[in-house]
Amino acid sequence: MKPIKRPHILYVEDDEDSCQMMTVLLEMSDIDVTCARSKSHALKMANDKEFDLFLIDSWLKDGDGNDLCRDLRKEFPATPVVFYTGCATLPQRKQGMLSGAAAYLVKPYSELVAPLVLKLINGSDTINVCVPPPGTLDVLEQKVTKLVHIISEAGRPIPLSP
């Protein structure tokens, strides 16, 4: 059995709040996250650093997630690509899978992301998902406090997913 490694993923999402929230959620499951806010930034980062998985949105300011998925699959054929997006129609999901994605998750079901990432990278059980490593509770509490502040900031609308 291969040893379990701490995964490092690239999350491609143009919404800053979503990046921060997903980073906190995945770090709680012992997954390192780097965020890219555009297709071009994602491709540059993917070439500069090694990632174990690409987690991407379908709608990006500078391009389509399906195009990004195809580009990543060409450049990094052994690295899984997973869509995490609000594009929920059957044709959109089908197009994502035809682009080469290993999986297609629909927002807002964030609790499905960490187990899938760990399964695709390590083939591991998800029994330890969301169990923070010893000594990290203070850091996680600070990050959660920051997220609560971002979400509840006065005058800022809180988007609701369907």
Image (spheres, rainbow, N blue to C red):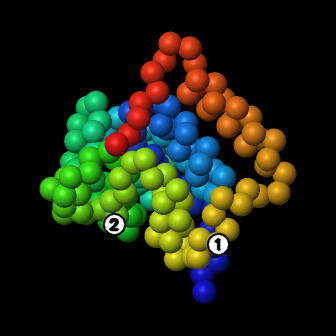
Q: Could you say where residue 151 lies in the image, as x and y percent from the top left?
A: 56, 27
- Which image quadrant for residue 54? bottom left
> Quarter of the image containing the C terminus?
top left
Number of numbered discs visible in the structure rendering: 2
Q: Which mark is residue 76?
A: none
Q: Which residue matches tag 2?
A: 102
- Which image quadrant for residue 101? bottom left
Which residue is at a point 19% across and 58% down the rendered structure image?
90
Secondary-structure class at tag 2: loop
- Which image quadrant for residue 105? bottom left
Q: Is residue 115 rendered to the left or right of residue 104?
A: right
Q: Is residue 156 above or below residue 91?
A: above
What amino acid type should be assigned to the residue bearing mark 2?
Answer: Ala
Crowding around mark 1 (Cα neighbors within 10 Å: few <14, some 14 to 19, many 20+) is few
Q: Which residue matches tag 1?
A: 127
Residue extending furthest left?
91
Which mark is nearer the camera, 2 or 1? 1
Which residue is at a point 76% across and 58% down the rendered structure image?
133
Secondary-structure class at tag 1: loop
What amino acid type should be assigned to the residue bearing mark 1?
Answer: Ile
> Quarter of the image containing the N terminus?
bottom right
Q: Could you say where residue 75 lies in the image, as x and y percent from the top left?
A: 30, 57
Tell me how far mark 2 sits from mark 1, CA to CA: 21 Å
In terms of depth relative to the viewer, which is nearer, 75 or 19? 19
In terms of depth relative to the viewer, which is nearer, 10 or 140? 140
Q: Could you say where residue 145 lies in the image, as x and y percent from the top left?
A: 70, 32
Q: Could you say where residue 77 lies in the image, as x and y percent from the top left?
A: 32, 65
